[in-house]
Amino acid sequence: MCRVSTVTAASPNFVFIIADDCTFRDIGCYGGQAKTPNIDALADEGMRMTRCFQAAPMCSPTRHNIYTGLYPVKSGAYPNHTFIKDGVQTVVQYLKPLGYRVALSGKRHIAPDSAFSFEYSGAKNPDMDAIDKLFKEASSTETPFCQFVCSNEPHAPWNKGDAAEYPADQVKLPTYFVDTPTTRQDFANYLAEITYYDGQVGEVLDLLKKHRLAENTIVMVVSEQGNSFPFAKWTCYDHGLQSAMIVRWPGKIAAGSVSDAMVEYVDVLPTFLDAAGAAIPEVLDGKSMLSVLTGETNHHKDYVFGIQTSRGIFSGPDHYGIRSVRSRQFKLIHNLDPEARFYNSTQKKAFFAEWEALAKAGDPHAVNLVNRYYDRPEFELYDTTVDPLEQNNLAAKPEYFQTIGILKAELARWMRSQGDQGQVTEMAAIDRMNTGNEMVKEARGLGTGSKKKKKKGGGNKKAKTKATPNS
């Protein structure tokens, strides 16, 4: 545990605002099409991180990752709808003894309740009245606080915001999309919901200003994992694992600054402890990025890591485990069972049916993307400096074998440090799921690739034929 220190009026407050299924590249100040005036203005007032990553491209592991300062396998929270191991400490246990009020408003997706004794408010989205009340009380009593503001946007269904701001025939689709009418409309609706999230960010910033708390509050805004279009959420591509991160701390963080230091969500908790003047427990996987935020250095880590556990996800396979390691230049992805097929609820959406129809008709772009989404080789290597969208797999090229060897060694070292046994850990994922969750009960009993399905010839092995121009 961290030491208990004497909190003073100068101790900074923390406000952490998180989206839900938002690809970082779609935010305005990251070059995206979504109109995000509040987030963009915050970037002008603080620091924009260009290489922030999370350890898992799913909601529940991500949130446990943030609140514990531990990577998913070590904390136990590595599948979706999961829970941490007994004895794992959380931000609540670390900050409350320091005199902080620790609150969470909006989406939770964490367990067990006994470990996450936040002051709760809101359900799927933040309760601005409750946040207003906490800010007012903290201001009047000079009590420091840590407020997590957890949006449910732009998680599907994309039904919030003004889609009229984004005419479907005018939006620019990512190159790793197939251009179809439904894809365009869904993407336009998704962009509108990012703007809705930006409005929530603006409301929180206005409340800080209202209660004269802005000057002594570290505000951190992130985008969470990527959206639920293909090649983002549920994958270890940068579309799934990389995040926006914008941090403001007046007088401490230079306005309009940009850092390309490699940081991770696991670093958030130790950063808060460091800023609060507390010791950082050695058990934590993350490390404080305070020196990066204050401009003392532009280097934090040489490698960041990723894990995707598909066992137990809705409309998912019996298993499909992925691990990844990324340096500043290269990303290595290890698909643990290359004979398995990858699928999830994305393939049940109307837009994906259009992708598959075009692939069946022989459209080369659709064939390539549909096949790549279902079936992947054991190893994928991307040079993210020249191929940021990870479209050109270099793993089979002899000139990159040395690079692959270095990255494999780093990934193996990290997995050992986590107690991650690869496929064995994947198959044990069901035991780390929150059985009190109705959706988990459904996943256990009815998920594609279950034992019952396998008896009927199901499972998740690759089909012998694929969609090709000649099929």
Image: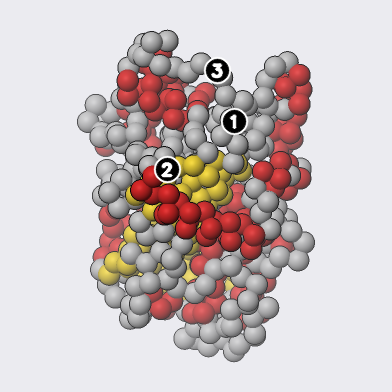
> Counting other residues with Cα less than 10 Å from the Cα at mark 2, is it few (<14), some (14-19), or many (20 or more)?
some
Q: Amino acid at mark 3?
A: Lys
> Which circle's residue, 2 or 3, is located before the other in the chain?
2
Q: Provide residue 177's location: percent of width, then percent of height.
A: 35, 30
Name the residue that disc number 1 marks. Answer: 340
Q: Provide residue 334's location: percent of width, then percent of height.
A: 53, 45
Q: CA distance from mark 3 to mark 1?
A: 12 Å
**Which of the colour schemes (rainbow, by chain, secondary structure, one colour) is used?**
secondary structure
Name the residue that disc number 2 marks. Answer: 395
Q: CA distance from mark 1 to mark 2?
A: 19 Å
Q: Amino acid at mark 2?
A: Ala
> Counting other residues with Cα less than 10 Å from the Cα at mark 1, is it few (<14), some (14-19), or many (20 or more)?
many
The furthest residue to the front: 398
Mark 2 vs mark 3, foreground winner is 2
> Is 206 situated left or right of 429 in this image?
left
- Location of the N terminus by quadrant is bottom right
Q: Amino acid at mark 1?
A: Ala
